[in-house]
C-alpha cells in the first residue's frame, strides 16, 4: 500500500498521509473505543486502588443494568422508539425522495433540494427548540386545535414520548431523504415507464422496480436515522419529560451525576452494540455491503 | 386518467404539507422572538417588541460561549480537514486487500452515536490526565468530522483524471509539484465545501460536546441549557440571528458554487 | 545529440501475464517511429516503459545510449502526448505550455518567450491567455504538442493522440505532425491502431501482436513484404489461401491448393517442400484478364459493391474460401453480378507465401 502511495505522491507526502491517517485512526478512533470497552469491565475504584488487587475484570457493570428494571425498561424503550422513529421517517421520506428524483422537473427539484437543505444547516438544538414552542401546553398547536374546535382541552404533547418522536422525525428526516433520493435518481426512468407499460400498478412498480434499486439508499437512511435516534441526547432532553427518559440520559447521569464512569462505559458499550447490531441487521435484510453505505 | 389526476393532486398536497411541516417550526421560532411575552411563544400574542435582541446583546455568557464555539470549530477545521483529505487521497490511490476494511474503519465514526464518541474520548484522555475542555472537544469532534471531510473530498477525487498527473510528471514535475499544481487546485472546491460543512458540524454539535466540554461551554450547549433553565425569548433572538446567518451563508455558498460551475462550463 | 531509444532485451510482466515478450529494438535518433497493433497488443505498455511510468521486469531502456534504469518519469528526456491530451483544465493555454519550464525553475520572461515561440510553431499565436475549454479539438491537439515540445525533449512519445478527432482533422493533423517532426528533428515514437496514420507518417513501423513485435520495416516494405501472416492480414487487406508446398526454388514457391490447383508466389523466409504454407494476394492485385505467366483461379461472385473510383467484389472459391477483389471502375461490365462465375488472375510476383496454415 505504501508503495502505491509513494509512486503517486513521492515518499515525503506518502509518509505524511500514512502518518495523519494512523494518528487519527489509532489515537482518535480505535484506542478510545477499546479503552471504553476495557473500562466497562472494571470496577469503579478510588484512584489509589487502580492497578491494585481490587482492579480485576468482571461483568458487574453489566449485571447492574440487567438487575435494574427501570434502566432495562428505558433501554428497550429507547431501542423500540428508535425503530419507530426510523420507520416513521422512512414512510414520510420515501414519497418526497421519489418525487424529487423522478417526478419534479429539474428546476423544481433543485429548488426543493435547496429548501430541504436550509433547515439542515440550522442547529439541531434550535430546530428541536421550535418544536418545544409549538407543542407546549399553551402553545400555538393547542391554540389552533382549540380554535378549530377539534379538542375541548389542550393536550399535553410533551408529557410522554410523543414529542420526542415528532422532534426526532423532524431532526433526522434529511438523513433519510438524501440517500434515498441519490439512489432513486440513478434509476433509469425508462425502467419505471416500462413497468407501467407492462401493466404494473403504482404499488407494484414501486415494490418491484424502484425499491429494489433504492435498497442501498434506504439502508443508509435507516442506519443513519436509527443511530442518530438511539444516540440522541438533545431531543429527549429538550422534548422529553422526567417520565420519558432516553437511555443516553441514563448514561449521562452515570458520568456526571452518579460519578461512576465504569458503569457509564458499560451502558455506552451496550448502546454501541445495539447500533452495530442494527447496522448488521439492516445490511442483511437489504443485502448491501459496507461499501454501499454513505455514498 | 381520472386516477392519475387524483394521484397528481395527492402528491402535490403531500409535498405542500411536507414543506409546511419543514418550515413552520422555523417561522414560529422567529415570530416568538418579537412577542412581548416572558416565555417564548406566539399564542397568545402580546404585541411586538425588539427587547429580546437587546437582552441577547447584553448576555455576556452567550458571547463567551460563541467565542468558545468559534475556537473549537477553528481547531476542528485545522485538524479534520487535512486528516480527511489524507484519507481520501489514500483511498483513491491504494488498491488491494485490506482497503475495504480500512474504509469501514474510517467510516465507523459516522456510524457511532455521538455520545459514544464523546465518552470514549473522555475516558481515553483521562488515562493521559487530560480532562474535558476546549482541547478535548476539538479532539472528539475531529474523530467524526474528519470522516465527513473524507467522504466529500473522495467524491470529487473519484472524478479526477489521473493522466493529468502523469502528464505533469512527463513534463518534468516532481510528484510534489504535480500534487501541488494539478491535484490540489482540482480539489480546492471540495476542500472548501468540506471545510464549511466541518465548521458547521462542529458549531452545532451537542451530543458529543456534552461529554467532553468540561467547564467550557459552546454556543449550542449554552442554548440547550437556556432552554431547560431560565427560558426567555432571548433564546429565540439568538436562534433567529443564527438562522439568518446560516441562510445567508448558504445562499452565498450556493451562488458562488453556481457561478463556478457555469465558469467551468 | 544522440536521441536514439534502445529497448535492450526488455520484458514486461504483470503478475503471470507477459505484456511484452523479450524485445530488442533500436529506434534511431530523429526517426518518426510507430508501433502499430490492435488494442491489447502491448503498444501502450512499451510507451509507458519508455516514458518511465512503469519499469521493465527484465532488460533495460536506453535513451541516447544512457540506461534509464531507476530514472523516474520526470527525469527522463522524454515527454508524452496523451490519448485524451490531458491538458490542465484549470490553467490557461500559456500556463499549460509553460508548465514544464515552470517546474524546472525557468524565469517568467524565458517562459513567456518559449510559449510565444511554440504557439507560433503550432500556428496559434496570441491564444496564450485563452482557457483550455475555449479551444476546439484541433487547437487542443496543437496545444498538447506545444506543451510537450516546450521542455525540449529528446524523444516525443505520442499515445494515439489523433483518435479523438474527426476524420478530416485527423488527416490534416497527420501532415502537420510530420512537418513538426521534420522541423524539430527530435525522435517521435507514435503508437496507434490506425494503419493509415502509421503508414503515412512513419519512417519505420513496428507491427505488434500479443506482446510481440512481428516486423519492423518502412511502410512500403511492410505492405509489400510482410514477414508473418499477422502482418500480411493486419496491414492492408489480404486474401489468404492455404496449401502444401510442392516446389521451392530460390525465392519462388509453388503450393498445391487442392481444388484451386497450383498457385505460386514469392517466398518470405525459408519454406521447405512438403510443409503447409499460406499464399497471400492483395485484393487490388487480381485481374479479370490473364496475361502471360499469370496464375488463375475460378470463383463465384457473391456481391458487387460500387465505391466510386473502384469496385469491390466478394467472391467464393469452389472450396468455399471467401475472396475480396478490388477493380478499377473502368473494368465494370454487366457480367459482374451476383452468382456469376469469374476467373481471377494475379502475377506471382505480387503474391507472397508465408509458412504455416494460418490466415489470422
Image (cartoon, coloured by chain):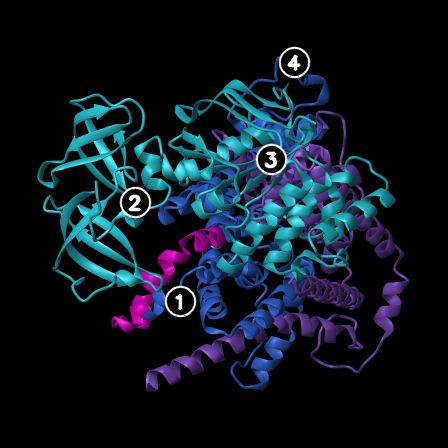
Chain colours: A blue, B purple, C cyan
Q: Which mark is residue A52?
A: 4
Prevailing secondary structure of the magenta residues: helix
Nearest the eye: A112 or C16: C16
Rounded to the nearest angstrom, the CA distance separating label 2 from label 4 is: 95 Å
Q: Which mark is residue B90?
A: 3
Q: Does the magenta stretch include residue A231?
A: no
- Look at mark 2 in the image and give the residue it sits on: C282
Q: In this view, does C27 lie to the left or right of C123?
A: left
Rounded to the nearest angstrom, the CA distance separating label 1 from label 2 is: 51 Å
Query: For the residue labelled by badge 2, is the local secondary structure a helix, a strand or a loop?
Result: loop
Rounded to the nearest angstrom, the CA distance separating label 4 from label 1 is: 67 Å
Looking at the image, residue A97 lies above or below residue C225: below
Q: What stretch is highlighted in magenta?
A: A194-222
- Look at mark 1 in the image and give the residue it sits on: A189
User: Which quadrant of the rendered structure holds the N terminus of chain C?
Assistant: top right
Tell me whether circle 2 and circle 3 mark residues in contact (CB < 8 Å): no
Residue C298, percent from left and from top: 13, 48
Residue C93, percent from left and from top: 72, 53
Amino acid at each position: 500500500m505504501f508503495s502505491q502511495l509513494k509512486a503517486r505522491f513521492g515518499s515525503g507526502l506518502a509518509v505524511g498521509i500514512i502518518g495523519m491517517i494512523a494518528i487519527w485512526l489509532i489515537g482518535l478512533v480505535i484506542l478510545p473505543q477499546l479503552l471504553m470497552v476495557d473500562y466497562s469491565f472494571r470496577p469503579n475504584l478510588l484512584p489509589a486502588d487502580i492497578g491494585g488487587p481490587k482492579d480485576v475484570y468482571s461483568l458487574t457493570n453489566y449485571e447492574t443494568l440487567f438487575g435494574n428494571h427501570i434502566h432495562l425498561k428505558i433501554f428497550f424503550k429507547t431501542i423500540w422508539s428508535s425503530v419507530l422513529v426510523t420507520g416513521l421517517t422512512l414512510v414520510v421520506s420515501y414519497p418526497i425522495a421519489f418525487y424529487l428524483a423522478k417526478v419534479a422537473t429539474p428546476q423544481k427539484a433543485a429548488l426543493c433540494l435547496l429548501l430541504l437543505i436550509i433547515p439542515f444547516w440550522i442547529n439541531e438544538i434550535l430546530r428541536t427548540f421550535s418544536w418545544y414552542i409549538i407543542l407546549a401546553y399553551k402553545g400555538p398547536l393547542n391554540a389552533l386545535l382549540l380554535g378549530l374546535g377539534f379538542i375541548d382541552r389542550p393536550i399535553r404533547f410533551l408529557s410522554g414520548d410523543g414529542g420526542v418522536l415528532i422532534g426526532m422525525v423532524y431532526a433526522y428526516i434529511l438523513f433519510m431523504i438524501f440517500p434515498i433520493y441519490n439512489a432513486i435518481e440513478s434509476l433509469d426512468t425508462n425502467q419505471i415507464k416500462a413497468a407501467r407499460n407492462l401493466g404494473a400498478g403504482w404499488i407494484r412498480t414501486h415494490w418491484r422496480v424502484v425499491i429494489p434499486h433504492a435498497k442501498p439508499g434506504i439502508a443508509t437512511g435507516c442506519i443513519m436515522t436509527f443511530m442518530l435516534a438511539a444516540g440522541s441526547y438533545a431531543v429527549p432532553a429538550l422534548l422529553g419529560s422526567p417520565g420519558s427518559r432516553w437511555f443516553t440520559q441514563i448514561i449521562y447521569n452515570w458520568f456526571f451525576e452518579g460519578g461512576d464512569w465504569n458503569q457509564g462505559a458499560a451502558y455506552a458499550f451496550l448502546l454501541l452494540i445495539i447500533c452495530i447490531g442494527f447496522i448488521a441487521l439492516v445490511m442483511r435484510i437489504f443485502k448491501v455491503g459496507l461499501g454501499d453505505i454513505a455514498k | 386518467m381520472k386516477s392519475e389526476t387524483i394521484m397528481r393532486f395527492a402528491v402535490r398536497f403531500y409535498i405542500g404539507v411536507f414543506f409546511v411541516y419543514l418550515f413552520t417550526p422555523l417561522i414560529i421560532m422567529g415570530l416568538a422572538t418579537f412577542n412581548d411575552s416572558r416565555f417564548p411563544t406566539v399564542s397568545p400574542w402580546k404585541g411586538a417588541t425588539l427587547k429580546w435582541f437587546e437582552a441577547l446583546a447584553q448576555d455576556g455568557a452567550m458571547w463567551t460561549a460563541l467565542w468558545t464555539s468559534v475556537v473549537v470549530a477553528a481547531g476542528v477545521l485545522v485538524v479534520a480537514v487535512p486528516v480527511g483529505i489524507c484519507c481520501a487521497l489514500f483511498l483513491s490511490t491504494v488498491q488491494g486487500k485490506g482497503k475495504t476494511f480500512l474504509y469501514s474503519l474510517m467510516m465507523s465514526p459516522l456510524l457511532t452515536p455521538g455520545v459514544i464518541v464523546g465518552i470514549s474520548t473522555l475516558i481515553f484522555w483521562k488515562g493521559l490526565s487530560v480532562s474535558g475542555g476546549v482541547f478535548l472537544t476539538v479532539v472528539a469532534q475531529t474523530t467524526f468530522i474528519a470522516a465527513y471531510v473524507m467522504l466529500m473530498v473522495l467524491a470529487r477525487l473519484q472524478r479526477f483524471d489521473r493522466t493529468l498527473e502523469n502528464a505533469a510528471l512527463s513534463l518534468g514535475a516532481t510528484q510534489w509539484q504535480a500534487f501541488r499544481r494539478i491535484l490540489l487546485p482540482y480539489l480546492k472546491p471540495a476542500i472548501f465545501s468540506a471545510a464549511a460543512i466541518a465548521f458547521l458540524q462542529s458549531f452545532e454539535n451537542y451530543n458529543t460536546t456534552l461529554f467532553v466540554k468540561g467547564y467550557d461551554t459552546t454556543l449550542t450547549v449554552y442554548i440547550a441549557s437556556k432552554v431547560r433553565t431560565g427560558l426567555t425569548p432571548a433564546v429565540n433572538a439568538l436562534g433567529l440571528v443564527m438562522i439568518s446567518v446560516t441562510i445567508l451563508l448558504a445562499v452565498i455558498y450556493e451562488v458562488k458554487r453556481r457561478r463556478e460551475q457555469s465558469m467551468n462550463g | 545529440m544522440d536521441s536514439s531509444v534502445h529497448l535492450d532485451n526488455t520484458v514486461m510482466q504483470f503478475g503471470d501475464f507477459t505484456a511484452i515478450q523479450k524485445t530488442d529494438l533500436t529506434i534511431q535518433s530523429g526517426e518518426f517511429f510507430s508501433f502499430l497493433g490492435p488494442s491489447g497488443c502491448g503498444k501502450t505498455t512499451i510507451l509507458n516503459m519508455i516514458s518511465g511510468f512503469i519499469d521493465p521486469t527484465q532488460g533495460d531502456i536506453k535513451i541516447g545510449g544512457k540506461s534509464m534504469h531507476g530514472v523516474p518519469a520526470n527525469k527522463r528526456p522524454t515527454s508524452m502526448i496523451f490519448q485524451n491530451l490531458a491538458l490542465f483544465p484549470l490553467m490557461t493555454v500559456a500556463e499549460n505550455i509553460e508548465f514544464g519550464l515552470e517546474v524546472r525553475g525557468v524565469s517568467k520572461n524565458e517562459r513567456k518567450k518559449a510559449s510565444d515561440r511554440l504557439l507560433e510553431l503550432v500556428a496559434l499565436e496570441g491564444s496564450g491567455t485563452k482557457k483550455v475549454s475555449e479551444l476546439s479539438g484541433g487547437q487542443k491537439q496543437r496545444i498538447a504538442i506545444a506543451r510537450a515540445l516546450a521542455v525540449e525533449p529528446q524523444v516525443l512519445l505520442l499515445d494515439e493522440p489523433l483518435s479523438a478527432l474527426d476524420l478530416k482533422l485527423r488527416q490534416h493533423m497527420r501532415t502537420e505532425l510530420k512537418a513538426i517532426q521534420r522541423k524539430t528533428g527530435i525522435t517521435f515514437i507514435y503508437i496507434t491502431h490506425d494503419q493509415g496514420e502509421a503508414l503515412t507518417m512513419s519512417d519505420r513501423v513496428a507491427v505488434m501482436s500479443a506482446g510481440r513485435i512481428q516486423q519492423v520495416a518502412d511502410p512500403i516494405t511492410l505492405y509489400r513484404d510482410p514477414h508473418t501472416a499477422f502482418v500480411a492480414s493486419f496491414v492492408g487487406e489480404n486474401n489468404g489461401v492455404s496449401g502444401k508446398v510442392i516446389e521451392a526454388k530460390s525465392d519462388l514457391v509453388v503450393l498445391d491448393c487442392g481444388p484451386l490447383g497450383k498457385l505460386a508466389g514469392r517466398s518470405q523466409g525459408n519454406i521447405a517442400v512438403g510443409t503447409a504454407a499460406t499464399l497471400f494476394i492483395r485484393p487490388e492485385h487480381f485481374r479479370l484478364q490473364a496475361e502471360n505467366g499469370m496464375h488463375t483461379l475460378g470463383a463465384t461472385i457473391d456481391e458487387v459493391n460500387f465505391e466510386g473510383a473502384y469496385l469491390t467484389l466478394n467472391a467464393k472459391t469452389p472450396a468455399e474460401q471467401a475472396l475480396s477483389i478490388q477493380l478499377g471502375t473502368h473494368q465494370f461490365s454487366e457480367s459482374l453480378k451476383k452468382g456469376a462465375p469469374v476467373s481471377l488472375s494475379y502475377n506471382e510476383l505480387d503474391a507472397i507465401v508465408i509458412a504455416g496454415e494460418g490466415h489470422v
